[in-house]
Image (cartoon, rainbow, N blue to C red):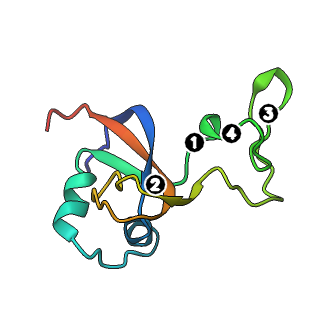
């Protein structure tokens, strides 16, 4: 039996195109799988952003007492979407304009020495 000894060192929120978001969410084929795979190399990836990175006015993760964010799932979160952007996708590097969606990269420290 192998024990997972990977630990999360840090996390980073990045912004991705709809193709990369759909690939992550639904396991749909990416138009350029080589670029997609290269953009995700060395990190664990999940949709959305960690609670601490939500905007101060976020209705889903509002600031509670002591400045701690508390989950309130009764609203839609707008922090994790950019309506339109010309910035390139942080995974596949596509320069095409369009919506961008928050994704969190978890930088993993592999304690197994691999």
Q: Are marks 3 and 4 in contact (CB under 8 Å)?
A: no
Which image quarter: residue 75?
bottom right
Q: Are marks 3 and 2 in contact (CB under 8 Å)?
A: no
The residue indicated by pointer 2 is 46
Q: In front: 79, or 37?
A: 79
Q: Nearer the viewer, mark 2 or mark 4?
A: 4
Q: CA distance from mark 2 to mark 1?
A: 10 Å
Q: Choose the circle earlier in sequence order: 3 or 4.
A: 4
User: Which label was assigned to residue 50?
Assistant: 1
Q: Nearer the viewer, mark 1 or mark 4?
A: 4
Q: CA distance from mark 3 to mark 4?
A: 9 Å
Q: In front: 110, or 5?
A: 110
The residue indicated by pointer 4 is 55
The residue indicated by pointer 3 is 63
Q: In front: 42, or 39?
A: 39
Q: Choose the circle earlier in sequence order: 1 or 3.
A: 1
Residue at image coords 77%, 24%? 67
Q: Residue 91's spot in the image, x, y percent? A: 31, 55
Q: Residue 108's spot in the image, x, y percent? A: 32, 37
């Amino acid at each position: 039996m192998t024990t997972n000894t990977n630990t999360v060192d840090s996390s980073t929120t990045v912004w991705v195109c709809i193709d990369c978001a759909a690939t992550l969410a639904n396991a749909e084929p990416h138009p350029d799988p080589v670029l997609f795979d290269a953009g995700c190399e060395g990190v664990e990836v999940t949709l959305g952003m960690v609670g601490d990175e939500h905007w101060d006015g976020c209705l889903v993760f509002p600031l509670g007492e002591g400045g701690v964010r508390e989950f309130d799932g009764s609203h839609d979160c707008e922090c994790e979407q950019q309506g339109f952007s010309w910035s390139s996708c942080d995974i596949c590097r596509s320069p095409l304009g369009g919506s961008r969606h928050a994704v969190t990269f978890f930088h993993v420290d592999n304690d197994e020495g691999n």
